[in-house]
Image: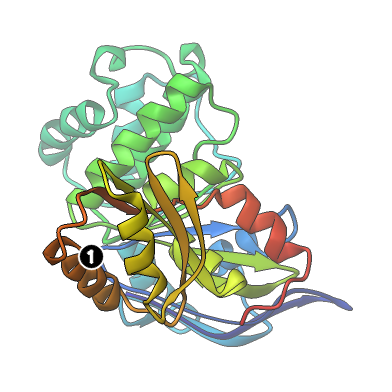
Amino acid sequence: MIEIIDLTKRYGKFTALDSLNLTIEKGSVFGFVGQNGAGKSTTFSILATLLAPTSGTAYVNGFNVQKEPKLVRKQIGYMPDFFGVYDQLKADEYLHFYGASYGIPFAEREKLIPQLLDLVNLSHKRDSYVDLLSRGMKQRLCLARCLIHDPEVLILDEPASGLDPRARVEMREILKELKSMGKTILISSHILPELAEMCDIIGIIDQGKLVAKGSVADIQAQLRGERLIIVKVHEGIEEAISFFEDDHNVSKLSALEDGLSFQFIYRGTAEEQTAMLKKAVLNNLGITSFSEVETDLEDVFMEITKGVELT
C-alpha cells in the first residue's frame, strides 16, 4: 500500500531524511515514533505530495508521489500536525466545503456528512460554529474532513497532540473503527504508550534514519536478544522450574511466589513457545498462566535513540 525507497530530503547541509526505506501493508496501522526534527513530518509531507524529495521516491497504492500527485491525493486523507479550520463556518458547512472541493455532488454530501459526523461523535455539533468547538472536537472534525472522499490511506501527523485524556481515548476508539473498515493508517505521535495500543507495527526514526521497525515486543527482543515470559502455576513450582530449565531456549530463570519467570531467546519462534506450553500442559504442571511481558514503548524509544545497536 505504501512503499518508500531510499527517500532523502536535504535542506542545504542538513539532512532531514537519510535514505529511508519502508513498506506499509494494506489495512495495517503503522506508528511513526521520533523526536521533533527526526523526520516524521518531512516523510508525511512527501507522501502527501506537498514536498519534493531530494532523491529516492515513494508510492501510495501503486502511484508515484512525484509523477502522479493528483492520483496520490485521491488515495489519501492527510491531517497535518497544525490543522486549519474555518472558524466562521458551521461543522456541516465545513465538511460541505471540502466535499465540494473533491467534486462530490450536493445530494451525496447530504447523505455522507451525517455519517461522518456520527463516526467522529460530532452529530450533536452539526450546527455549531467551528470556533466554538473544543480542541478535541476540532481534531475529530478534521479527521472527518480527511474521510470525506473515502480515501484508502490516512496520514495523520500527531492527531492526538494537545488533547486531554478523554479526547485521546475518543480519538483512539475512532482510529480502531477506521482500522476495522480496512483503512491503512500511518500515524505519528509523541504519546508513545498509545501508539503501542493502536498500532500493528511501529517504526522509530532518529536523525532521519529508521533505526527500528516491528511490534514493541519484537523491537525490545532485538535490543536485548530475549523475551520475558511469566508462568504462573497453582502448585508444583519446583517441578515447573525443573521442566523449563531443560529447554534450550530458556535462560535467567527465577522463581516467583506463584510461579516463575524466564528469558526466552529471540531466536525462539512463536511456534517454539507454543510447543513449549503444549509440552508443559501434557506434563501436568498445573499452569494457570503463560504470557509474554508487554514492553513499555517509552523505554524502548529512549534506549534506541541513545544509540543502542540492534542485534
Residue 228 drawn at (x, y percent): 47, 59
Neighbours of disc 1 within 10 Å: few (<14), some (14-19), many (20+): some
Does residue 50 appear in this view? no
Which residue is located at x 29 percent, y 34 percent?
A: 96
Residue 288 drawn at (x, y percent): 22, 45
Picture layout, residue 238 above or below residue 209? above
Which residue is located at x 27 percent, y 23 percent?
A: 121
Does residue 90 appear in this view? yes
Residue 42 drawn at (x, y percent): 64, 64
* Along the viewing direction, whichever of 245 and 9 lies nearer the viewer: 245
Quadrant housing the N terminus:
bottom left
Quadrant housing the C terminus:
bottom right
Horizontal side of 191 relative to 58 (left or right) equals right
Which residue is located at x 33 percent, y 78 percent?
A: 269
Horizontal side of 49 relative to 12 (left or right) equals left
Horizontal side of 160 relative to 234 (left or right) equals right
Amino acid at dot 1: Leu
Residue 133 drawn at (x, y percent): 46, 15
Picture layout, residue 303 above or below residue 17? above
Secondary element under disc 1, as helix, strand or loop, is: helix
* Along the viewing direction, whichever of 181 and 127 lies nearer the viewer: 181
**Looking at the rendering, which quadrant does residue 61 occupy?**
bottom left
Picture layout, residue 212 above or below residue 48? below
Mark 1 sits on what residue? 277
Tell me which colouring the rendered structure shows. rainbow
